[in-house]
Image: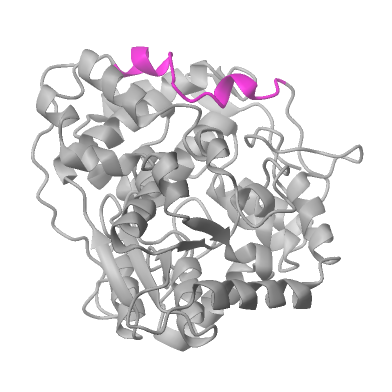
Amino acid sequence: MEEKLDIRPADSAVAEYREYKYFLPKITEGKIPYGKHALNSFDGQLPLRPKEIFYCKKCVISNQRPRITFDQNGVCGACNYTEYKKTIDWKKRKGEFDKLCDQYRRNDGRWDVIVPTSGGKDSGSLAHRLKYVHGMHPLCVTWSPMMYANIGMQNLQNMISSGLDSHLCSPNRVLQRKLSKLGLVMTGNHHDPFGRGIMCYAFHVALKEGIKLVMFGENAELEYGGDLKNREVPYNPFEDWEKYYFKHTTHQKILKFGYENGYLSESDIKEPSNKWYALPPIEEVKKAEIAARWYSWYFSWIPQENYYYAAENYGFQAMPRRTESTYSKYASIDDLTDPWHYYMMLVKFGIGRATSDAAHEIRDGHLTREEGVALVRRFDSEFPNKTLKVFLEYLDMTEEEFFSVIDAYRAISPHIWEKANGEWRLKKQVS
């Protein structure tokens, strides 16, 4: 008997699982050769992948993760950063954070810090701490996910109900669906417009509201493996964002391609919400003296501790069962389409959702490497069948069209994938 979708309804934490019923009009006119376009991916990270695959000696991450570094002992930069954090004077860093809050704190009825917030455990616990631990006046700015899962909406409402101000932006959903399809085809990531929006929209709000500080949670480049050059500063300069967050391409380039190849209409590229998928002019941000900071630079960042904090302080709920393609229950559960973001990460880089979860839990001391390897080998390549139907409805694609994209990305990754007896399989797995 097929399992029901692991999505908890918003109206009851123990009720029967169900999906929201979404209104999803057709968005595609004519037939577009998706796989052909995928062969010319805009993801500038793909040509930089090493052709020989190896895995970290301490965790389970591979050298295919974009920008990750390894030392002479075969240990990844994220594991080495975990060791480096043991040498940080966290008391001194806390003092610096207190001074930062004093610099920006307002007591005149205005917000003094923006927190890009999904309602998940990390951003939610950050916003709650800023208000109730650090005495700030945060405005939570939420960029709506592709398709809210019931449990995601419930967690967002629980966070708001704890006394936090929240601003929910739901950009033109017809346009976002088209951009999502375009993101899947041209960057191998249907979350591309979501990633751009969640990073950029907060700065549009900051300019409009006159808020000088934007506080993000963790610096993924340091915590999970990436470029370490900003290790000694509490932010990543805007000049690095295209490389770190936008896959070496711009929203305007994607719009131009989409219009010229039939994904987008002339009216689509003139939609006002397009401006939110890119940062405001950097000159304006700098002139307004808006600062971006990582909370993880001032305080040791442990996702599991954020979960416990969120559960205790505003009733954050985890899934009762594991989510698809991994063993965990509380990470990235806001969006019904989340499993496909991680599945395409597996397709492009040979590392999936279980790898992502296990790697940082090994670094945090919650798993041994042996346990992590076993979990990755068991769950990482699991196909997210439960959400396939709703995902394809969202993208307005057939299974044949979708698999043509997957096959195209595997075809340009011959060092990761091989085809045997008509089926694709990873050439090398962690051991």
From this viewpoint, is residue 362 visible?
yes
Of residues 268 and 360, the one drawn nearer to the viewer in this rendering: 268
The residue at the point 16 percent across, 45 percent down is 172
The quadrant where residue 42 appears? top left
- Tell me: 374 left or right of 337: right
Of residues 79 and 51, the one drawn nearer to the viewer in this rendering: 79
Residue 39 highlighted magenta (yes or no): yes
Which residues are drawn in magenta? 34-51
The residue at the point 19 percent across, 28 percent down is 269
Of residues 26 and 13, the one drawn nearer to the viewer in this rendering: 26
The residue at the point 36 percent across, 39 percent down is 278
Mark count: 0
The quadrant where residue 168 appears? bottom left
- Tell me: 207 left or right of 226: left
Give the residue furthest to the right: 73
Give the residue furthest to the front: 287
- Tell me: 211 left or right of 63: left
User: As displayed, is residue 190 above or below residue 105?
Assistant: above
Residue 353 highlighted magenta (yes or no): no
Of residues 244 and 19, the one drawn nearer to the viewer in this rendering: 244
Image location of residue 274, percent across then percent down: 24, 38
From this viewpoint, is residue 1 visible?
no
Image location of residue 383, percent across then percent down: 44, 42
- Tell me: 208 left or right of 413: left
**Where is the C terminus found, in terms of image quarters?**
top right
